[in-house]
């Protein structure tokens, strides 16, 4: 556990918390969005908000791959999975994501062959082992996971594997951030940039956020001290009247990203004209599909998918939560009708979803806990 | 109303909603129903408890303590479907014996007799069955119980996965203490008898699907001796004992919090976890608090008996790694919260879906 513990040191956290408190002007509030669901998870899991002054708020952004999948795409995937000749493979997070009428977990119980994998290459292995089946990989995620899907497609093509395909739901982070910045109700002071996505795309694509929109952005790592330090860097920029892109996660993120990964991505995938995001609606050029050259690996083209758009449930306010306009508990159905057991919205499903993270880790009265732990 | 007050009001509403009796909405059984978390509980309450309802079953303890012929008998049953059947540190055989012995032991009973039922798949190697039964015999001898009755069924190939084992057990309760998940009181301390998560991690890695290897073994072991030492040392100061199997320590503590109407505050840094288990859990994104153990128990003990309890546990080879990990508080009930090593606070909630099926 070396290399991890040093980023979780409570003493260093207290020191950073003190300098954060010193930097934050008491008569104003600061609202920062952590774009990435991985950050949301870290923030709740380690209780990072306990180290922040009351006037520094973290709101949770759209960077949870599962949370942004619209219900219609889940239905399409289930439609494919229910075919008797298909083995659907997916990351575990997708199992409970509700579609219009059911989830993968329900479809599996109803007879569909749905298997959890940890990597698209596992799906390829299943395809090799089951030549009489058509193995489909439910591809989700941002630029972080898209290159591994691309590499898997390239490998399948190199092997001439004919029974493997990808149901591609990869999305790109920049258009979503743009949509949030353009939304009239946003009141953000800055961003914690997504560390993992940035290992692929680098830091340059964020520059418009700082220059055009005047909001500082710090690309942040995923350990709790990374988050605190990034908050500190944002506050410092604001205190000094600066607005630039900074890289707190330089130990992992190169400024120019990973050209090899981007190369593979570009060879296999291209931007879709538009794609629907859960809660955010259609966003132009915000998602990826397989290029024509790889049509033979594109489940959307191989199988007849209904492609029906399913409206989000009326009560669900995932969109407002994903934009950071509402805190999870401010959603009308949070915790009562919508729970991790019976999620209505996707934010309640993945451990990276803002609502699930708050429900599972943060749903308690800080006042009562302070009382209880005072000895 | 301030934002904080509104948030608190929402949280209160949520706890009220959670307190209501569970309704089973699912039309089919999913893997979540077998995971030991919220869905399992809902299934048990809505289907089994609703049909079988009686005062001995209602507390949903790991065993029932029944009166018969003037004696107090502890009675329990458990089925084992672990995959793979053999793993470092044990196999389905010793798991099936120790698991049932431990369910009896958690009532403070002296385990006496076990039954063993086998469901075998056509084609299953006799050599494997012999090996499993051999481990059962050794485990029974080690736990001081006898397997006195049994049953065998064979199903067609593909209708089962090799071998499933069901054991039931009877023990005699010779003390007069009342133990149970509803007996925790504010001020009590929470102990665990050793490093957690060994069994679940071992089985997960033994499946070989993750491409990670770790030097870790199942902790499967009979705990009746450890329990009797603890009861000798602390007597009525022991409130509740639970072996932290499916759903791990977190699930046990949530049951205690709910059944006793109390809160539990855990100190994350005090929870013993082997570095290998922590590393694997970190990579897999699983919290060790939810990983199954097969030879560890959680004890809730009156504050004044905490030192005696710790000494009693540590005096037994199976409790050498025991530690005080938290304490019982009045509020926030019925939540388990955790002071993180990082100096923050978070909830340790009931498990919703289990990423690790067929761990026992």
Image: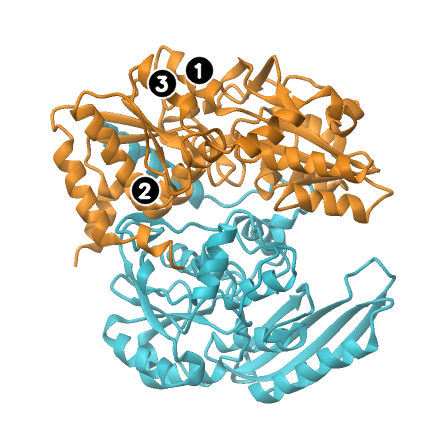
Chain colours: A orange, B cyan
Q: Chain of mark 3?
A: A
- Indicate whether B208 appears above or below B351: below
Q: Nearer the viewer, residue A50 or A254?
A: A254
Q: Is residue A177 left or right of residue A215?
A: right
Disc 2, SS: helix
Distance, label 1 to label 3, CA atoms, is: 12 Å
> Is there any visible trace of residue B324 in the rendered image?
yes
**Residue position marked by numbered label 1 in the rendering:** A179
* C-beta proximity under 8 Å, tags 1 and 3: no
The chain ID associated with circle 1 is A
The dot on residue A226 is 2
Instruction: Determine which of the numbered discs, if any, sits on residue B38 in the image.
Output: none
The residue indicated by pointer 3 is A209
Q: Of residues B75 and A251, which is closer to you in this image? A: A251
Q: Nearer the viewer, residue A351 or B245?
A: A351
Q: Residues within 10 Å of mark 2 (few under 14, many from 20)?
A: some
Q: Quadrant of the N terminus of chain A?
A: bottom left
Q: Secondary structure at mark 1?
A: helix
* Residue located 75% across and 35% down the image: A81
Foreground disc of the pair 1, 3: 3
């Amino acid at each position: 556990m070396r290399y991890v513990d040093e980023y979780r040191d409570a003493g260093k956290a207290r020191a950073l918390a003190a300098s954060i408190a010193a930097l934050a002007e008491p008569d104003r509030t600061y609202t920062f969005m952590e774009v990435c669901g991985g950050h949301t998870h870290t923030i709740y899991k380690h209780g990072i908000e306990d180290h922040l002054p009351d006037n520094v708020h973290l709101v949770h952004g759209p960077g949870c791959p599962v949370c942004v999948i619209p219900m219609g795409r889940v239905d399409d995937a289930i439609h494919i999975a229910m075919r008797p000749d298909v083995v659907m493979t997916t990351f575990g997070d997708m199992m409970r994501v509700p579609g219009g009428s059911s989830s993968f977990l329900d479809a599996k119980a109803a007879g569909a062959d749905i298997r959890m994998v940890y990597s698209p290459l596992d799906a390829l292995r299943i395809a090799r082992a089951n030549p009489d089946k058509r193995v489909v990989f439910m591809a989700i995620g941002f630029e972080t996971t898209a290159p591994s899907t691309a590499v898997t497609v390239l490998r399948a093509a190199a092997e001439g594997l004919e029974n493997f395909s990808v149901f591609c739901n990869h999305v790109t982070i920049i258009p979503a951030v743009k949509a949030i910045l353009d939304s009239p109700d946003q009141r953000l002071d800055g961003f914690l940039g997504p560390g993992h996505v940035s290992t692929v795309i680098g830091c340059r694509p964020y520059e418009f956020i700082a220059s055009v929109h005047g909001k500082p952005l710090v690309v942040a790592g995923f350990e709790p001290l990374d988050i605190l330090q990034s908050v500190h860097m944002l506050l410092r920029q604001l205190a000094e009247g600066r607005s630039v892109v900074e890289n707190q996660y330089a130990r992992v993120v190169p400024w120019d990203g990973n050209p090899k990964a981007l190369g593979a991505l570009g060879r296999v995938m291209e931007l879709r004209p538009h794609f629907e995001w859960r809660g955010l609606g259609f966003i132009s050029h915000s998602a990826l599909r397989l290029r024509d050259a790889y049509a033979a690996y594109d489940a959307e083209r191989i199988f007849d998918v209904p492609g029906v758009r399913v409206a989000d449930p009326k009560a669900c306010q995932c969109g407002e939560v994903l934009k950071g306009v509402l805190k999870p508990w401010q959603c009308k159905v949070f915790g009562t009708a919508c729970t991790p057991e019976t999620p209505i919205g996707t934010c309640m499903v993945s451990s990276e979803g803002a609502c699930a993270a708050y429900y599972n880790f943060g749903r308690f009265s800080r006042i009562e806990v302070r009382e209880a732990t005072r000895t | 109303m301030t934002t904080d007050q509104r948030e608190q009001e929402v949280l209160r509403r949520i706890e009220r909603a959670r307190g209501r009796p569970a309704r089973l909405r699912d039309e089919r059984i999913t893997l979540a129903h077998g995971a030991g978390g919220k869905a399992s509980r809902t299934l048990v309450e809505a289907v089994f408890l609703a049909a079988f309802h009686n005062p001995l079953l209602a507390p949903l303890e790991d065993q029932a303590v029944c009166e018969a012929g003037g004696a107090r008998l502890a009675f329990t049953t458990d089925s084992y479907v672990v995959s793979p059947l053999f793993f470092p540190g044990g196999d389905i055989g010793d798991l099936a014996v120790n698991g049932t012995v431990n369910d009896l032991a958690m009532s403070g009973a002296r385990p006496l007799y076990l039954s063993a039922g086998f469901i075998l798949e056509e084609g299953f190697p006799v050599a494997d069955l012999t090996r499993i039964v051999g481990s059962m015999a050794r485990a029974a001898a080690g736990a001081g119980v006898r397997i006195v009755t049994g049953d065998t069924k064979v199903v067609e190939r593909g209708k089962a996965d090799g071998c499933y084992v069901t054991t039931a057990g009877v023990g005699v309760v010779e003390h007069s203490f009342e133990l149970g998940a509803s007996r925790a009181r504010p001020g009590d301390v929470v102990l665990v008898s050793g490093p957690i998560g060994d069994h679940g991690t071992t089985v997960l890695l033994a499946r070989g699907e993750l491409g990670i290897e770790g030097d870790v073994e199942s902790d499967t072991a009979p705990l009746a001796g450890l329990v009797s030492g603890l009861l000798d040392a602390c007597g009525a100061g022991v409130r509740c004992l639970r072996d932290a199997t499916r759903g791990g320590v977190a699930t046990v503590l949530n049951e205690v919090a709910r059944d006793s109407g109390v809160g539990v505050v855990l100190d994350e840094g005090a929870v013993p976890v082997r570095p290998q288990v922590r590393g694997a859990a970190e990579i897999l994104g699983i919290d060790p608090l939810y990983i199954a153990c097969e030879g560890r128990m959680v004890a809730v003990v009156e504050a004044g008996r905490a030192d005696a309890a710790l000494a009693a546990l540590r005096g037994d080879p199976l409790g050498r790694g025991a530690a005080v990990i938290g304490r019982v508080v009045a509020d926030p009930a019925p939540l388990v919260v955790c002071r993180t090593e990082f100096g923050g606070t978070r909830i340790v909630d009931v498990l919703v879906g289990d990423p690790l099926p067929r761990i026992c």
